[in-house]
Amino acid sequence: MRPTVLAALFCLAVPAAASAYAPNAHAAAPQAVLQKALNDPARAADKVDDSRRKIDQVMQFAEVKPGQSVLELVPGSGYWTRVFSGIVGPKGHVYTVWPTEMGKFDTESLGNWQKLVATPHYANVSILQQPAAKLQAPAPVDLVFTVQNYHDFHDAFMGPMDMAAFNHQVFDALKPGGLFVIIDHVAPAGSGFADTNTLHRIDPAAVKQEVEAAGFVFDGESKALHNAADPLDIKVFDKAIRGHTDQFIYRFRKPAK
């Protein structure tokens, strides 16, 4: 992916397709906790996107709970971060990872993020600046979460990346039983990683195979962001589909033992 379009990718809206996923109320935060986080006045500007981003369903699917620790890869504008912060609460923590390779050219966004983490309201959020190929968490986390940027880690601008090693690093960052949730733009079946830098899409089957090779167990899929009308063969920035791409949501679990 070219650096000149990265900032736009962060802000892409997501499709409003209906979800086929029925969340397990016992596995995620109580609905009252989720609603309180969603209704936080500090994220008033974000609420216009909640319906199409299906944030309530995504958070339920990610099984986020009070007191947990979350490692969010490339937080972008902080849309997801602000909700994570509200759900995990003062006893939890959200580590946001800004790869060094991105911070080099997106200094404005990085600067805005440094201001956000210095805000008392987000005292449970911190920023980690590190090379993309050397993912580390200060302590084992319950969830690693990434939206629309797993495909970026396959591209040259992120530096020399060994994706097998990267996924092992994600595995090592998680507590036993922890989750790795990936949301990204769908590429045509069988295309593998051919479209990551051209269409900014990735083949879900290739992602599944790549992540499972690191020791993860596939733990479920949500169709909340599915859009059958997406032709899959155009750039995600194309005005015909921008904000309405077909996206997969995969959940992988690190074995408890």
Image (spheres, grey):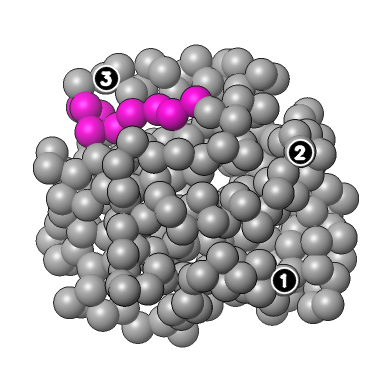
- Determine the secondary structure under disc 3: loop
Q: Residue at x 37, y 73 (%)?
A: 255
First in residue order: circle 3 vs circle 1? 3
Is residue 203 at least partly visible in the picture? yes
Residue 101 rendering spot, x and y as whole percentages: 67, 27
The residues colored magenta run 121-129
Mark seen at residue 216: none
Residue 27 falls in which quadrant of the image? bottom left
Mark 2 crowdedness (10 Å alpha carbons): few <14, some 14-19, many ≥20: few
First in residue order: circle 1 vs circle 2? 2
- Determine the secondary structure under disc 1: helix
**In front: label 1 or label 2:** 2
Magenta stretch holds residue 126? yes
Is residue 231 at least partly visible in the picture? no
Closer-to-camera residue (36/112): 112
Mark seen at residue 119: 3
Q: Amino acid at mark 2?
A: Pro
Q: Amino acid at mark 3?
A: Thr
Residue 214 falls in which quadrant of the image? bottom right
Q: Which residue is mark 2?
A: 160
